[in-house]
Amino acid sequence: MMQEAADTAQAATEAVDPLAAFKDPAISLIEQSEQFDHAGGPVEELFFRTAGQNETAVFTDSLFLLTLWFSVFFFVLLMGLMVYWVIKYRRRPGVPAEVSPSHNGPLEILWTVVPSSSMIIMFLLGFQGYMQKTVAPADAIQLQVEGQKWDWNIRYPGGEQSAYFTSLGTKINAVKIFVLPEDTPIQLKMTSKDVIHSFWIPDYRTKMDLYPNRYTTITFKTEKLNAGEAYRDHWVFCAEYCGDLHSQMFGVLRVVSRENYDKILQDWNTGNLSPEAHGEVLFKSNCVSCHSVDGSNNIGPTWKNLYGYERPISGGTSVVADDTYILESIWNPTKKIVAGYEGQNMTNFAHLTQEEVSAIIAYMKTLSDKGGAAEDAPVEGENEESQESTGG
Ligand code: HEC
Ligand SMILES: [Cu+2]
């Protein structure tokens, strides 16, 4: 009886989460791509693998095929004629060479007008496609994209960040799922925190580099979902080699209805979260590529039993990991380097607000068995200063 009651209670809580479907960590794209018609015949499948998923992608594919078949036609025609004439007019013993005609007006006009007008047509079509991917309509939603070794981050217009994740059996155990409303123009304003990355959405046939200290943009329009389709996923890859885990730098764009988009953004609005839960979201969206919470040291030290413990600092000193130390480690990470991590540098997260840092600290406390204790620990003196200036 008790068990039954518990089951019903659980079913009830599951039923009240209308967004559960969108948190699904399984990427639907793999099965979906089997269902979509390939763009046509074997040539299309060879080049595109899956059909383009929005209007611009379909246009890009058609233009690619037009250029391809145009080139194939003229290649075969010209090479065929050449081979034919090489054989037909080959030098034969005893046959004197014919005198070439010096001029043929109609022929010369033909071979000037046909190629140049074809080139102009291809240029104009290409330019049209380029404009579609470059110029955002006035009603486009503008999202801020940040690339960082080895992770993507998107900030939505109200400051929201993705709180849905998928694990694909990679080292990076929280690949972000970003939602986008269907049938809507989107503009991405992008920059990088460290090296050059490239934001690539194969399904939309769209790709653009991200640079540190500079903004680049791309524009695309999401597709309409079919009736009864809850969402459609699209991979995002990094297409610019950026170091060790470059191959695992990816994300998922999940196209949902506008109504669900609004609901999900509300769900992501961190104003509704407890500090610990907010901290976990921030961890997953900023820190998980280098830090673990399960005790394994990754690129950076694990956060398990970090808070409140004595940390060995490069140069032989040590410091208790209290709030101030953690704040400093986030805003100014090179000030005290953890012993053993001298060669690794953590990028600074100075853009995280005081409130966000506090949320991270609250989350860290939940990971440490000294979570409650170190609050009153004496603040470490600034006597490590001398260690830092011994570099020269
Ligand atoms: C690019 C990899 C990387 C990312 C991303 C990263 N860190 Fe680090 N972190 C490191 C490395 C490496 C160290 C050790 C060297 C040092 O102390 O600077 C470190 C050290 C720390 C420390 C001190 C840990 C200790 O053992 O005493 C804290 C706290 C910390 N990071 C917090 C964060 C937070 C919060 C984020 C996300 C907002 C973050 N880090 C993101 C690489 C990273
Ligand atoms: Cu990259």
Image (spheres, rainbow, N blue to C red):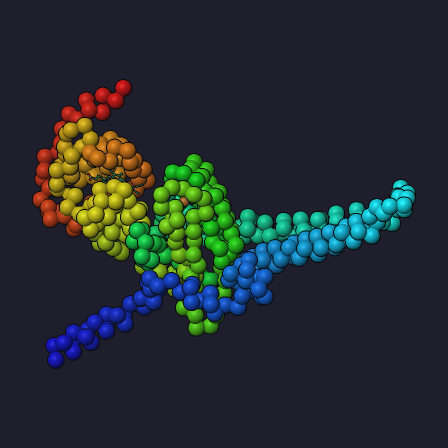
Left/right of residue 321 with respect to residue 151 in the rendered view: left
Residue furthest to the top: 392
Q: Quadrant of residue 18?
A: bottom left
Q: Is 138 positioned to the left or the right of 366 in the image?
A: right
Q: How many marks?
A: 0
The picture quadrant for ligand 2 comes to: top left
89 left or right, relative to 154: right
Front residue of 129 and 83: 83
- The C terminus - image quarter: top left
Asked whether residue 155 appears in the rendered view, the answer is no
What residue appears at the point 16 percent right and 51 percent down from the top-left corner?
366
Q: Is residue 162 left or right of residue 373?
A: right
Give how far across and how far down residue 102 sits, in percent.
89, 41
Q: Is residue 238 visible?
A: yes
Splitting the image into 4 quarters, where does residue 29 fall? Answer: bottom left
- Residue 181, position as x, y percentages in the image: 44, 60
Q: Can you give x and y, in whole percent of width and height, for residue 360 in the image?
A: 23, 46
Q: Which residue lies at the image location 38% right of the left edge and 41% below the top edge?
A: 243
